[in-house]
Amino acid sequence: MTAPAASAPSTTQIAQVSGRRHRGLVRRVLDRPAGVVSIAYLVLLIVVSLIGPFITPFDPNQNDLRGVLRPPGLDHWLGTDDLGRDVLSRLLVAGRVSLLATAQAVLTGLAFGVLPGVLAGYIGGWFDTIVTRVADVLLSFPSLFLALAIVAILGPGLGNAMLAVGIAYAPRFLRIVRGQILFVRNETFVEAAISTGIPRRRVVWAHMLPNAWPALIIQISFMLGLTLIIESSLSYLGLGVQPPNASWGSMIGGSKAFIEIAPWLVLAPGLVIFFTSLAFNTLGDVLRDEVTGGRER
Amino acid sequence: MSAVTEATVESATPVLEGVDLVKEFAGRTSLFGRASSKVRAVDGVTLRLHAGRTLGLVGESGSGKSTVGRLLLRLLDVTGGEVHLGADDVTRARGRDLNQARRAMQMVFQDPYSSLNPTMRIGDIIGEPVTFHRGLKGAELDAEVDRLLISVGLSPEHARRFPDEMSGGQRQRVAIARALAPDPKILVCDEAVSALDISIQSQILNLLLKLQREFGVAILFVSHDLSVVRHVSHEIAVMYLGQIVEFGPADRVADSPAHPYTAALLSAVPEAKPSHRRARQKVVLRGDPPSPSRRPAGCPFASRCPAAFEPCHETRPEHTPVNGGGTAACHLQTQGPKLGGRSLPIELLRARPDEAPSAAD
């Protein structure tokens, strides 16, 4: 049994996800060590990223050509880069860029995925067939490849890149929501809600969609981890954030020439990306375990 | 589609009326998407509900009784026939009109474990129709939810709970409170007590009767259990294979049935008193009901009826009046023994060994 540490939930698991189990979910996740640690780390990271620009020990874009490539020390805790800029300061500011970009991509995916998914599941018929086919076509491209193609058309820039990634994500959210809507469509409580004479819109949004949230939240958690990597990859390639601003990925990309004489330049952002991605995925695992009830080995 | 059952109740206009209702479901589709056969679940049923009265609808599984309830509430679209809500024809009502009509007709479902949204609090489940239909908000809404909870025998603090924090009986009370929330004129109870423990069943039945006395709602009580139906109903309609075979005042139908199927149903009800037990004779039906996709030309019950004779297999019996009120659709009333409105003598139903029905399907 060689289960990957962080795999997206399979369709069968998603099908088992039901609204019944997800109350008290936050508390149950916090009861698990992996849940507490990853949430604590992510909360800390978000807080630091929000206040980052105000607590930087140095100006992150200030060159100091007399002190380039200094190793970590008391002055510069994480050393300086090839232009003498303080790595810790840049890391703090870059965190905000990376996290916002990640959130932007996932929100874009939700914006383009949830509504069509709800409608496809609820209306069914030919509408469902068309929407599902379009989603399948989009899904057949790897996210990074699709993002590269869209960036090539729209030009480099983090906003464009993340919009592209978000659109590439939409089909995944669409499929989950559609599946969940299909799952609850014939439940008696939905028929009961219809029978009370409340508008259909309300039946869908208040009675059907909430049952899709647990599955959606699990997926969001995994996607955040994945997006962080994609954002880093794009920025590393120079297609994301543009200099002199930094994201974690561009910090690695800009320092790759010095990896032998100044490894801290790559290690610091590399480790942050690693741990952040790990935290998102671990949280996704814990959520999935708690929602599906089964703790897989 | 002519089996019209005349209600014998006071001539007041019914609050809800289904006329000649027909419902066909597409049968199994073949490999290439062609519908193989249509299943006629409801075949020309006419029902009238009156304010403050309870109509019991009995029949076995698959008789179409639940489908009738859903057709009346327009939860299913009719294939034929009409639904009248008071003076309004709501057969084709859609969207806003339909939601408006539903304010007057509400439903209590069989299984209180699946009919309440697990993600919503009790207060929201009950409050939602109040808000939508009656426009109450804030403190007014809370007060109304409290009042509804109390009226079904729960307490206001239940409003904060989730369905899975309550027992089956409590949940069914919540379902009843939700149905009462829009202030309806009609309540359709679809096997509303079948999923509950016996001790809870009677509580819920008494609650329904109490609410009917208080609010004067008309109730359609759908159940497979004739003893329960008799307890709560003023009139009883007996369904078999999508048709009403007998209709009449509850006591008359239950005490002196005029249709062989009703008699068979009755003899299946367990009797508590041994003295009664001996006096009654069992009518044991053989075989299964015919498939609703291949329905017989004559009486739907003919293939299982111990008293069936020639016309039963060829022509469909009309409803004829029965002494003591109501009607029955049986050839025995007009031909052969010519009962002419008398109830069915049990001797007719005793299986005759010489002509025991062959196990023909």
Image (cartoon, rainbow, N blue to C red):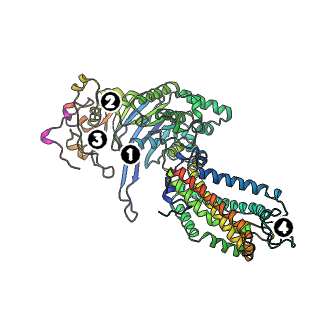
- List x then y, in percent, for residue B202: 42, 28
Q: Quadrant of residue B122?
A: top right
**Which secondary structure, mark 4?**
loop
Q: Earlier in the sequence, mark 1 or mark 2?
A: 1
- Which residue bears the numbered disc 3? B317
Q: Nearer the viewer, residue B81 or A140?
A: A140
- List x then y, in percent, for residue A296: 49, 55
Q: CA distance from mark 3 to mark 4?
A: 95 Å
Q: Are marks 2 and 3 on the same chain?
A: yes
Q: Which residues are magenta?
A: B347-360
Residue depicted at x 76% and y 63%: A91
Q: Earlier in the sequence, mark 1 or mark 3?
A: 1
- Which residue bears the numbered disc 2? B253
Say whether marks 1 and 4 touch (CB < 8 Å).
Answer: no
Parent chain of label 3: B
Please tell me whether residue B357 belongs to the stretch shown in magenta: yes
Instruction: Tell me, for residue B42, which label it has, or none.
Output: 1
Q: Residues within 10 Å of mark 4 (few under 14, many from 20)?
A: some
Q: Residues within 10 Å of mark 1 (few under 14, many from 20)?
A: many
**Which secondary structure, mark 3?**
loop
* Residue depth check, mark 3 versus mark 4: number of the one nearer the observer: 4
Q: CA distance from mark 1 to mark 4?
A: 78 Å
Q: CA distance from mark 1 to mark 3?
A: 17 Å
Instruction: Tell me, for residue B322, which label it has, or none.
Output: none
Q: CA distance from mark 4 to mark 2?
A: 92 Å
Q: Nearer the viewer, residue B12 or B63?
A: B63
Q: Quadrant of residue A222?
A: bottom right
